């Protein structure tokens, strides 16, 4: 699915001051490509990603997800069916097993149990985690493994747009390479639109297109 930004701005309005965190960004992100967004701390990367995820609406301009403005999307539907977000701290449910974590979005979709189990198994294989992990809790996994579970969950969900905010921030270089390879393969093999916010120069080397944010603008 494509995601297009048309002259998007966002301001945080405080009592004493207004911060224009995103300032007139226009860009078309295309399916099948893996994008890296780099930029200094405070340049507006997370704010931009949150707008694309539909967590908030732009104060000016609009964002089209598959041709439809984020203000017209049912937010729950958009998050369930179109856009998924991967975070630095993995956001797994600590009391659910690996398999249950992966199946969670499928149970929201009310997928039959048998189908759910076989899909969870398939995506767990794709991120190269062994079968024995199905019954483990997230805290018994390494950081890289937890991030792969989070990616498997996204894969199971079948989202066409994947947004990742510093997904490799807690990982060593070997795990970073592996995670970014998996994310890029989702773009190249499955036609997903993958956008990764990162400070990591090795991620930049693996992406198809590198964009830089500076003072709220994309350059
Ligand atoms: N909730 C908020 N209220 C007010 N200002 C905010 C809020 N969140 C972010 N900002 C400001 O908006 C600007 C952009 O912040 P943002 O978090 O998008 O930057 P970033 O590029 O993701 O930085 P980092 O690399 O450190 O994660 C910064 O000046 C920040 O101080
Ligand atoms: Mg940030």
Image (spheres, rainbow, N blue to C red):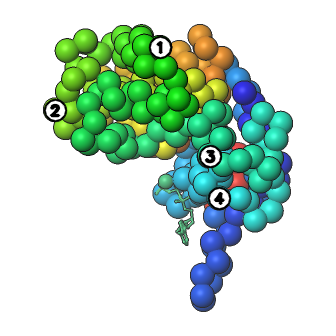
Q: Residue at x 68, y 69 (%)?
A: 11
User: Going 26% across and 20% down the picture, which residue do you hit?
Assistant: 134
For mark 1, what is the residue?
115
Specify whether 69 is left or right of 175. Answer: right
Q: Residues within 10 Å of mark 3 (few under 14, many from 20)?
A: few
What secondary structure is marked by label 4?
A: loop
What is the secondary structure assignment of the residue under circle 2?
helix
Dividing the picture into quarters, in which one does residue 100 lie?
top left
Under circle 3, the secondary element is helix
Q: Earlier in the sequence, mark 1 or mark 2?
A: 1
- The nearer-to-camera label among 3 and 4 is 3
The mark nearer the N terminus, 1 or 3, is: 3
Residue at screen point 60% across, 41% down: 79
- Where does label 2 land, which residue? 140
Q: Nearer the viewer, mark 1 or mark 3?
A: 1
Measuring from the top left, give residue 173's x and y in whole percent: 31, 28
Residue 39: give x, y in percent of width and height: 55, 49
Q: Secondary structure at mark 1?
A: helix
Depth-wise, is mark 4 or mark 1 nearer the camera? 1
Cα–Cα gap, marks 1 and 2: 26 Å
Q: Which mark is residue 56?
A: 4
Name the outermost residue toward the left: 140
- In the rendered structure, which disc, 2 or 3, sits on the residue that comes first in sequence? 3
Give above or below for 81 relative to 116: below
Residue underneath mark 3: 76
Q: Can you tell which of label 2 and label 3 is closer to the viewer?
A: 3
**How far apart, in angstroms, are the residues tagged by discs 3 and 4?**
13 Å
Q: Quadrant of the N terminus?
A: top right
């Amino acid at each position: 699915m494509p995601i297009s930004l048309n002259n998007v701005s966002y301001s945080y309005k405080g009592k004493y001051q207004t911060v224009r965190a995103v300032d007139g960004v226009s860009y078309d992100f295309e399916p099948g490509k893996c994008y890296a967004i780099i930029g200094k701390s405070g340049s507006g990367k997370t704010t931009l990603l949150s707008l694309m995820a539909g967590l908030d609406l732009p104060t000016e301009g609009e964002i089209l997800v598959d041709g439809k403005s984020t203000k017209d999307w049912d937010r729950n539907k958009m998050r369930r069916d179109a856009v998924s977000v991967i975070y630095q701290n993995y956001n797994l449910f600590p009391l659910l097993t690996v398999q249950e974590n992966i199946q969670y979005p499928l149970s929201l979709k009310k997928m039959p149990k048998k189908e759910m189990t076989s899909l969870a198994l398939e995506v767990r294989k794709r991120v190269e985690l062994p079968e024995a992990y199905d019954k483990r809790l997230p805290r018994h996994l390494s950081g890289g493994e937890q991030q792969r579970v989070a990616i498997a969950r996204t894969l199971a969900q079948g989202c066409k747009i994947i947004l990742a905010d510093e997904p490799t921030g807690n990982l060593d270089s070997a795990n970073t390479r592996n995670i970014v390879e998996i994310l890029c393969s989702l773009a190249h093999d499955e036609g997903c639109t993958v956008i990764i916010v990162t400070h990591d120069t090795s991620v930049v080397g693996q992406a198809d297109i590198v964009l830089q944010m500076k003072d709220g603008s994309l350059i």
